[in-house]
Amino acid sequence: MTLPLPLDGLAAIVTGAGRGLGRAEALELAGLGAAVVVNDFGQPGRDGSGEASAGPAEQVAEEIRATGGRAVAHTGDVADHQQARQLVELAIEEFGKLDILVNNAGILRDRMIFSMTEGEWDAVIRVHLKGHFNTTRFASAHWRERSKAAGGPVYGRIVNTSSEAFLAGSAGQPNYAAAKGGIVGLTTSTALALAKYGVTANAICPRARTRMTEDVFSGAGFEQPESGLDPLAPEHVAPLVGYLASPAAERVNGQLLVVHGGMVTIVERPRVQAKFDSKQDTFTYDELDALLTPHYARRPAGETFAAAEVLGLKRE
């Protein structure tokens, strides 16, 4: 007797699924039994440049169908509000409902903060942060309507894609780091808002070698091995997405998880490091100087918060 797969009977959307992480995630969900809408705008440049193409999304959808799965391609731009609506509507039309939303689409336009243009800032915020919002907006409305009709909770899973650039800083990526930080805020707010409808929302910080990151890892001690599975292969990330999308993860909500190379780290929400109380009605400059300056003097000049050390992100 064949046992049911964890995602049998469920329908998923994966954005940015034509290549890299999104492709691995779409194949993983399909392998676990989900029907998948493979979304990808299809622009060849990692900066969002070039002509849009249906090729990448269609190719991954065909890969899924070739192994007996159910998949359709969607080539719209998730950063466009109406195209994101159409993406959610396509899942409902094709599969009768939507159960899983994996937001992965993104671009890079790296520049130091003192050189970045307004267009470079806006483009990255638009695709990453607004793209996550757009799809979440329409998926959450679908689940809310279903919950009201059912008179109780329904099944819904959101997996968003943040980054270690938000957690530990990335000097040449102020737009990207800000967008990824915003995605964490969007995720925790969504988790609180949708919990009563049976929907969970979580975010991952994946480290993977893809078209977007290949030059970041090159020459930085993360070279691709000549043989064996690359520790930074997207296939290390996809199983966590499959788990978070599954019924087994029903108690996982509003969480941030770092994943790469056979490792998953659960990140705690920020904790208070130190607390100082004024001895007067309000603080004065002199009092703050006497309290805070000695506290920070114990750290090396310019050191930021210790997320990098906590996560083990700093190389020896």
Image (cartoon, rainbow, N blue to C red):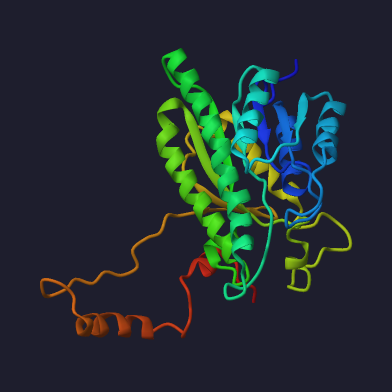
| Location of the N terminus (image quadrant) | top right
In the image, taking residue 10 as reference, residue 192 lies left or right, namely left
Instruction: Pick the residue in front: 208 or 76.
Output: 76
Instruction: Pick the residue in front: 179 or 209.
Output: 179
Q: Is residue 7 visible?
A: no
Q: Is residue 171 above or below residue 1?
A: below
In the image, taking residue 18 as reference, residue 272 lies left or right, namely left
Q: Is residue 213 above or below residue 17?
A: below
**Which residue appears at 46% of the width and 71% of the height?**
305
**Which residue appears at 61% of the width and 20% of the height?**
97
Q: Position of residue 176 (x, y in %)?
A: 60, 60
Please tell me in which quadrant of the rendered image residue 195 appears.
Answer: top left
Task: State how many labels appear.
Answer: 0
| Location of the C terminus (image quadrant) | bottom right
Please tell me in which quadrant of the rendered image residue 54 appears.
Answer: top right
Q: Position of residue 13 (x, y in %)?
A: 66, 33
In the image, taking residue 154 as reference, residue 45 lies left or right, namely right
Please tell me in which quadrant of the rendered image residue 85 appears.
Answer: top right
Q: Is residue 136 visible?
A: yes
Instruction: Pick the residue in front: 158 or 177.
Output: 177
Q: Is residue 103 above or below residue 33?
A: below
Q: Position of residue 259 (x, y in %)?
A: 63, 53
Q: Position of residue 229 (x, y in %)?
A: 82, 54
**Which residue appears at 56% of the width and 28% of the height?**
247
**Which residue appears at 75% of the width and 18% of the height?**
2
